[in-house]
Image (cartoon, rainbow, N blue to C red):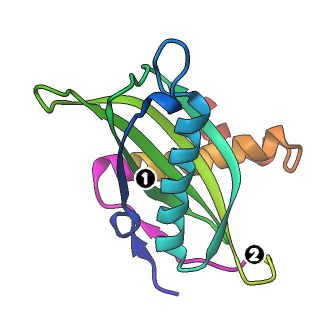
Amino acid sequence: MDAKASKESLTILTDLVLPGETNYLDNLFGGELLARMDRACSIAARRHSRRIVVTASVNHVAFNKSVPVGSVVTIEAKVSRAFKSSMETYVDVWIEDRQSGQRTKVNEGIYTFVAVDETGKPVPIPQIIPETALEKERFEGALRRKQLSLILAGKIKPNEATELKALFN
C-alpha cells in the first residue's frame, strides 16, 4: 500500500451560519460546529483511506472565538497521521469578515477515525507523507497524542510511551 501526501486528503467545507443554528447570543451552537467539523474530518479520512470510516474519538476541540450569525465559516480538514487502521485528522475553522474578506482562525480540533470494511472490521490504510512544516509538526505530534490517549484509556503503561518519555528526558 503506497503512502500518500497529507494534502491529498484536504477537505474544505464553506457554509453560512443561519439564525436557527445559533444560541441566545446569536453565536453558532458548539454542537453544530462539532457536527460540521466531524463531517469535514470524515471526508478527509475517507479520501485518504478510500474506505468506510467511523469516528473513533474527538481528541481535542478548542472553541477559541465565537462564530456569529451570518458568518461565512470555512472548515479545513486533513489527515495528519495514519497508523494501522486509524488516522488522526486535524481540522481548522475560519470565519471571513463580511466587508474585508479577511479570514480569522476561530477554532481547531483533532478527530480520530478508523477505516473499516463492510462488516465493521478495521482494515489497513496507507501511511502519510507530511510535506509542509505544519504537516510535519502535526505528524510528529500525532504519535505523542496517540500514546497519551492510550495511557489515559489504560491500554498501555506510561513507561511504554517512548515518544512521550522523550519529551521529559
Q: Which mark is residue 77?
A: 1
Question: Which residue is pictured at 62% across the width and 66% down the height?
Answer: 83
Considering every residue shown, the one lying at the far bottom of the view is 1
Compared to residue 23, the image places residue 36 above or below, namely below
Q: Which residue is mark 2?
A: 122
In the figure, is residue 39 to the left or right of 67?
A: right
Q: Main secondary structure of the magenta part?
A: loop
* Residue 169 seen in the figure: no
Compared to residue 136, the image places residue 22 above or below, namely above
Question: Which residue is pictured at 45% across the width and 78% down the height?
Answer: 3
In the figure, is residue 53 to the left or right of 80?
A: right
Amino acid type at circle 2 is Pro
Which quadrant of the figure has residue 151? Answer: top right
Compared to residue 159, the image places residue 100 above or below, namely above
Measured as percent of width and height from the top left, residue 163 is found at 62, 46
- Quarter of the picture containing the C terminus is top right
Amino acid type at circle 1 is Ala
The magenta-colored residue range is 122-136
Marks 1 and 2 in Cβ contact (< 8 Å): no
